[in-house]
Image (cartoon, rainbow, N blue to C red):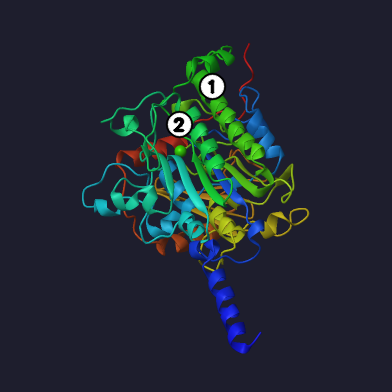
Amino acid sequence: MNKIHLKGLLFYVVMTTMLAPQFLKGQSKGNESDRPNIVVILADDLGFGDLGFNGSKQLLTPNLDALAASGIDFEQGYVSAPVCSPSRAGMLTGKNQVEFGFDNNLSTNQMGFDPAYRGLPVSEKTIVEYLGELGYVTGLIGKWHLGYAPQFHPTKRGFDEFWGYLAGGHDYFRSESDGKGYLAPIQCNFKTPGEITYLTDDKGSECVDFVRRHKGEPFFLFASFNAPHTPMQALGKDLELFAHIEDEKRRTYAAMVYRLDVNVGRIVKALETEGLREKTLIVFLSDNGGPVDSNGSCNAPYNGQKGILLEGGVHVPFVISWPGTLPKGKKYQHPVSSLDLAPTFLSLAGGKVSPNMFSGVNLMPFVKKKGHGDKPHESLKWRFTISGAILEDGWKLIRLPDRLPMLYHLPTDMSEQKDLSMENLEKTEELLGKLGQWDVGLPHPLFLEGAEWKKRQLQLYDATYPLEQPVREK
Ligand code: CA
């Protein structure tokens, strides 16, 4: 072969390589076959204690229990906000959402605020966009709740496919073609959606369909269930399973969580059937703690509920399962955050995680170690409207506008029953200082929700919550 022919051959090889699909879709490092599919299954307003693997004696969650047993149960798993939309904004960006002004739940626009900013800021890059650039096909099935204006639409924020609705919740049985709010029609950019049967089942079906259609390429599926968020609506056959529960709201809640569990089982089964289970990392968590007052959930053994920074608002069930790669049946005991998911996913997909790119960290190096090893975080911090909190070395301080700060030592008082702030003034002062320094460095909120929620939030701190599991009723 002469030099000219050799050059021509080299040119051909280089060009065909560069035009190969993986180069056209986005470049990736490392071995393509090592990159897992990623499925995030998000429950909405699920109580920490309402899962078999978290000690429920009343609810039935065999599929979620099996999922937890197949992977790592993060016993100290936290979300970055105690309500839906800021929690989701944090999870999808890997940044604490208050670092970009997403302090509040998404609600009606407040006077003086520009509605063009009422959503996940377009200046923030989502993990979905990162994964798309790395060649992943991405889908959102279910609830969005990160903005209604066109610039915030899921298909503008990285999702190739969207089947769902933009609001914070939806009726489980019906939608209307011109419906608003919880009756809004289902949106879909890849087919004409059928009638709703029971929304949790419909989402499960769409997730199974997504897995089947994309089994041959790396995918990211965000299974965004609204169960067991209000409205309290369940299937008759599921209610019969819990006929022994006297309280109607709790009975309905149990049936809704059961149906969620059934559909988690369908998604896992679809992955197994397609031979993808060991190529797929599944994350399961709830976007915030259970709102004990509205859906009959139970956060035992944690005090508090959705909307506040006591453990019941932000300490959630948190499972990562990837059989064959991650240990199974492991209980991980250092605090982790939903903000850790984006950097973990980006790293697994072959992307580069730079310092200061995320508030969270890539969890893989921490969880692969034997035993418990180093902790991923020095501290976790929260700011939610009128409240703030910091957790460091087991000490948790909560700051509210109308009272002295509260200090709890979680390793000895997980239910936050004994306020130690006055007898540990040095620790109180230290954590208050760290929280305050962080707080004053944050930008202003981009939007607010109604002022009535501020007083409501304080009232939730004064309420009492069940700290023990309800027994199984006859
Ligand atoms: Ca929620």
| Mark 1, secondary structure of its residue | helix
**What residue would you read off at disc 2?**
229
Q: Is residue 447 above or below residue 15?
A: above
Please, what is the three-letter code of the amino acid marked with disc 2? His
Q: Residue at x 64, y 88 (%)?
A: 2
Q: CB of residue at label 2: within 8 Å of ligand 1?
A: yes
Q: Position of residue 364 (x, y in %)?
A: 66, 57
The residues tagged by marks 2 and 1 sit, at their Cα atoms, a distance apart of 12 Å
**What residue would you read off at disc 1?**
255
Check disc 2: other Cα within 10 Å, few if <14, some if 14-19, many if 20+.
Answer: many
The answer to whether residue 158 is visible is yes
The answer to whether residue 54 is visible is no
Check disc 1: other Cα within 10 Å, few if <14, some if 14-19, many if 20+.
Answer: many
- Residue 318 lies left or right of residue 252; in this view the side is right
Q: Residue at x 50, y 48 (%)?
A: 398
Q: Is residue 100 above or below residue 303?
A: below
Q: Quadrant of residue 215?
A: top right
Please, what is the three-letter code of the amino acid marked with disc 1? Ala
Q: Quadrant of residue 233?
A: top left
- Residue 323 lies left or right of residue 254; in this view the side is right
Proximity of marks 2 and 1: CB atoms separated by less than 8 Å: no
Q: Quadrant of the N terminus?
A: bottom right
Residue sitting at the far bottom: 3
Q: Position of residue 79 (x, y in %)?
A: 52, 47
Q: Residue at x 54, y 46 (%)?
A: 214
**Label placed on residue 359:** none
